[in-house]
Image: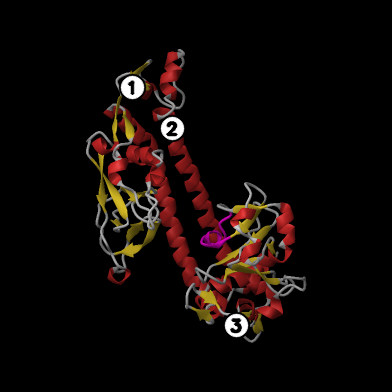
Amino acid sequence: MSLSDWQTVKVDDIKALTKNALAMGPFGSNIKSDFFVPDGVPVVRGNNLNADRFNDNDFVFLTEEKADELSSANAFLDDIVFTHRGTLGQVGIIPKNSKYARYVVSQSQMKLTCDKKRVDPYFIFYFFRSPIGQHRLLQNTSTTGVPAISRPLTSLRNIEIPLPPLPEQHAIAHILGTFDDKIELNRRMNATLEAMARAIFKSWFVDFDPVWAKMEGEEPAGMDAETAALFPEVFEEVDGREVPTGWEISTIGFVLELAYGKALKESERLPGQIPIYGSNGQIGWHDEPLVKGPGIIVGRKGNPGTVVWSHTDFFPIDTTFYVTPKMQSMSLPYLYHELMLQSLPSLGSDSAVPGLNRNIAYMNSIVIPPAEVIKRFDTAVMPLFNLIYLNTMQSRTLAALRDTLLPRLISGEIRVPDVMLEAVET
């Protein structure tokens, strides 16, 4: 197979023939925070372009009327969105299963509507996610002040794309999309598994459902008889709070230590399998851990109070704390869910760089169930944690395979077999 049937086209050649097929987001004065409302038409920002294809959550909203005013910046199904100012290189595509009928791109984004008679929008999306696409997208970047693409629409319009025939575009998009579909499925499965673990924790240790059930002469739902027998049938008041009889109330500082992470500059990080955590979650990899896993990381500076679980050994940097239990009966899964409910972000300071004061956090109260109840909780949730870890590792492998194939498929180094072309087309 040769590349003789491939063309070289410019973005301007493959945009749709409709008005505003290639358009900038509105001026900042037209999309200020004053215009945001609790619900309506979502605004696409950089955080929505950080996922594999598109993060269809975490929006601010405009009214339908305001979105109509900004019609040139409206984005719809299969439109491709680029960041031209701020975190450059971000590319997303409005997905086929999008939650909303339309979106408005922010003042830092621009959007492209493709001519589907000539191109598969997902092929174009993956081109811009490839190394060559990223290079061409960022070749006119200005780093003075806020990073930005100079003359963004003109730059985007003139980018050249190697374009195979439409059936091969569909096949390439299908291959790469299959990886992303499975990664997205794993993400959703993990969200469900995490919600199941939280629901068990809330039922046992916040709502005390087993105790209430026994008080009403019923068998606690969702647990075996041996576990149910560990819960009492009555409450008592401890330090002004009602808790199951025999349970205690103490402080976070009594049951755990928030130990300081350690500085690790990017220049000092070596390739490896150890996740590095900052206050925003995982930020990279290293070849040796600071802490043996599993473990809990708590944001200290920048994004204070965030709580993240690490399934493996890990390296928390100096913008974080990591949790060390002080009580033998206090398991990490129990402490993780307890800290998630502690509203730690609200304890951050209002300084230029927000920070979590651990001495203030230590004063928060915590329920201390009997050790055997905590053991049963671990037995109930650890299979969920393990499944989350397996899904996460599978997604990491799939992403690596996709990223290896991506530039080779997009450049034509690897060609799609004719049999696959026929299968995709049918």
Visible residue check, residue 172 = no
Residue located beneath label 3 in the image: 1
Q: Is residue 421 above or below residue 193?
A: below
Q: Secondary structure at mark 3?
A: loop
The residue at the far top in this view is: 217
246 horizontally vs 140: left or right: left
Q: Amino acid at mark 3?
A: Met
**Which range of residues does the magenta coloring cover?**
45-56
The residue at the far right in this view is: 18
What is the crowding at mark 2: few (fewer than 14 residues within 10 Å), some, or many (at least 20)?
some
Going from N to C along the chain, the mark reached first, 3 or 1, is 3
Disc 3 from disc 2: Cα separation: 59 Å
Instruction: Report the residue at 42% width, 16% height from top.
Output: 214
- The answer to which quarter of the image holds residue 396 is bottom left
Q: Amino acid at mark 1?
A: Leu
Give residue 140's mark: none
Q: Amino acid at mark 2?
A: Lys
Instruction: Report the residue at 59% width, 74% height from top.
Output: 416
Residue 162: x percent and y percent? 61, 81
Give residue 202's mark: 2
